[in-house]
Amino acid sequence: MKVKVIGIPLSEEEIEEYKKYVRNKHPEDKIEELVIESDGEYVDLTCYTRALPFERIRRITGYLVGSLDRFNDAKRAEVADRLSHDTEPFVQEM
């Protein structure tokens, strides 16, 4: 984890405590950078996490799916026969 300290200098022990706090607070996140901003009275912690890949989920023929891999031939034909609706907004020019 990369750490950036802004404001007043902090000891290694303080930085480690802030890192431990952030890891305990967000155990599921993979934190890449921690920014510690201090004005002497208050401390602001800002975490930057690694972007996680995600799969697009669509509603196709009544099912929520990410891909068509598990569809049989009939469902694949149903997908092929679907009408694609235009998503462009209606604009009337005069």
Image (tube, grey):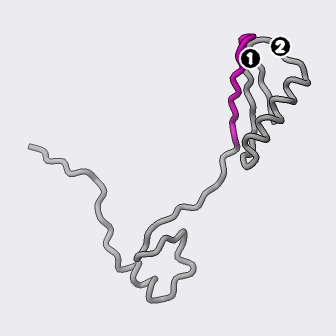
Left or right: 74 in relation to 45 = left
Q: Look at the image and say whether residue 46 sits in the magenta stretch.
A: yes
Circle 1 residues within 10 Å: few <14, some 14–19, many ≥20: some
Q: Considering depth in this image, is 70 or 11 the residue closer to the camera? A: 11
Q: Considering depth in this image, is 79 or 20 the residue closer to the camera? A: 20
Q: Which residue is rendered at x = 52% and y = 82% of the image?
A: 71
Most extreme residue toward the left is 94
Q: Position of residue 73 (x, y in %)?
A: 48, 89
Asked where in the image residue 32 lies, by quadrant, the reply is top right
Q: Which residue is rendered at x = 64% and y = 55% of the image?
A: 53
Q: Look at the image and say whether residue 87 sits in the magenta stretch.
A: no
User: Label 2 sits on what residue type?
Assistant: Pro
User: Label 1 sits on what residue type?
Assistant: Ile
Figure check: 57 above or below 62: above
Left or right: 86 in relation to 65 = left
Q: Position of residue 82 (x, y in %)?
A: 34, 76
Q: Quadrant of the C terminus?
A: top left
Q: Main secondary structure of the magenta part?
A: strand
Q: Which residue is rendered at x = 20% and y = 51% of the image?
A: 90
- Helix, strand or loop under label 2: loop
Report the Cα–Cα distance between label 1 and label 2.
Answer: 8 Å
Q: Considering depth in this image, is 48 or 92 the residue closer to the camera? A: 48
Q: Which residue is rendered at x = 76% and y = 36% of the image?
A: 22
Q: Quadrant of the N terminus?
A: top right
**Which range is magenta?**
38-49
Left or right: 59 in relation to 20 = left
Name the residue that disc number 2 marks: 9
Name the residue that disc number 1 marks: 6
